[in-house]
Image (cartoon, rainbow, N blue to C red):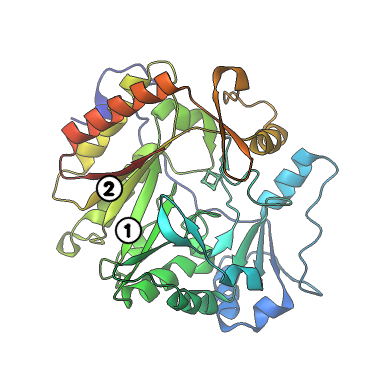
Amino acid sequence: MQISDTFLPTDIAISPEKPSKLWMPKRVLFTPDALDEPFGQKILERVNQYNLPVEILKNNRVTGLRGETERETYKLAKSTLAIVNASPSAFRLRPIPPSADYQFHLAEGCPAHCQYCYLAGSLQGPPAIRVFANLPLILNNTQNYKLPNKITSFEASCYTDPLSIEHLTGSLAETIEFFGKQSEKHLRFVTKFDAVDPLLHLEHNGNSRWRTSLNAPSVSRRLEGGTASISARIKALRKLALPRHEGGGNYPIGVVLAPIMPIENWQEEYGVLLDELRHQLDFPVNLTFELITHRFTPGSKQVLTEWYPNTSLEMDEATRAEKRNKFGGTKYVYTKDTMKEMKQFFYGEINKKFPEAEILYWT
Ligand code: SF4
């Protein structure tokens, strides 16, 4: 019996699977430079298959994304897909500890509506979804980054959810196949979407770790608008990990539990989630966990409050511990005692339920 079939209160149980819809933008903009790229042309072909309204911009600046209010700007931008070329700064790769040695970007922005979104405060300007048409150059540039005597890892989902727009771009497939040919480089990315079928057959050679972001059922229902349901994400993860002869993708997989929150009944809710995951991953699997607690900065709180004025997300500085980074910035995390209690719980449960898995970090 699945956990979702048992007699749990509805806010704790994982909801039965809802069919996920592919995201369709209301407008698709191409800059002239992006259209000159062969990969930009491929994106145009894909977009045309969906009969989406396409505009070719007069120059390489994407404008016209501002409404009269912040809320209008948010709505307008979040329904716009812009195909652009990444700027020269995208070719200077930065480290991204503890997730990977380097980060690079296939796109910036995401069509979902998570009320705690990590992009708030990291990306400037209206939150349109910008996809990079010069992807082949971006991928080749990763060849210039190699750490001595170790496999170098690259994170591709710091500024986007790459699966959320894959049907329109093909960028993730291109990237997985590129890394499939690299002997000492590994790719990592994370998603809250589930349209994995077209990517199961790719030649990844075990070089891509496909992670799914999961959360307590009630957190997901309340705060993760426009994403695939938790149940659909777990089923997609199962398909990704299953061996090829069983119709799966044979990918190494991971679970990113984020952002972990000490909501009411948090032990029960996260326990239900881990039980459902174990139930679906009932075969030998190459699995990692990353455990990330909720945090916010003054900047991200301001942006999120403008985007989601009625949010029920708790961002009360008074109940949090303040942490300063080496550049003088402040973030608000849970207090030491809460962190300790949660860490003990998650390490205990994961080690018990997934003895084969590796916990990469807790933060
Ligand atoms: S899926 Fe990730 S990037 Fe997209 S809105 Fe949610 S938190 Fe933000």
Please tell me the numbered disc located at residue 169: none
Q: Amino acid at mark 1?
A: Arg
Q: Does 160 appear above or below 70?
A: below
Q: Residues within 10 Å of mark 1 (few under 14, many from 20)?
A: many
Lower position in the chain sequence, tag 1 or tag 2 = 1
- For the residues bearing labels 1 and 2, Cβ distance under 8 angstroms: yes
Q: Is mark 2 within 8 Å of ligand 1?
A: no
* Residue 275 seen anywhere in this rendered image of the structure: no
Identify which residue, 243 or 95, lies in the foreground.
95
Disc 2 marks which residue?
288
Q: Residues within 10 Å of mark 2 (few under 14, many from 20)?
A: many
On screen, residue 287 versus residue 10, left or right, reads: left
User: Picture coordinates of residue 52 (x, y %)?
Assistant: 64, 64
User: Picture coordinates of residue 102 (x, y %)?
Assistant: 46, 62
Residue found at x 26% / y 38%? 277
On screen, residue 71 versus residue 119, left or right, reads: right
Disc 1 marks which residue?
209
Residue found at x 51% / y 79%? 136
Q: Is mark 1 within 8 Å of ligand 1?
A: no
Indicate the secondary structure of the residue bearing disc 1.
strand
User: Picture coordinates of residue 86 (x, y %)?
Assistant: 63, 70
Q: Does 270 appear above or below 45?
A: above
On screen, residue 141 versus residue 176, left or right, reads: right
Q: Amino acid at mark 2?
A: Thr
Residue found at x 73% / y 78%? 32
Quarter of the figure with residue 130? bottom right
Looking at the image, the residue that sits furthest to the right is 68
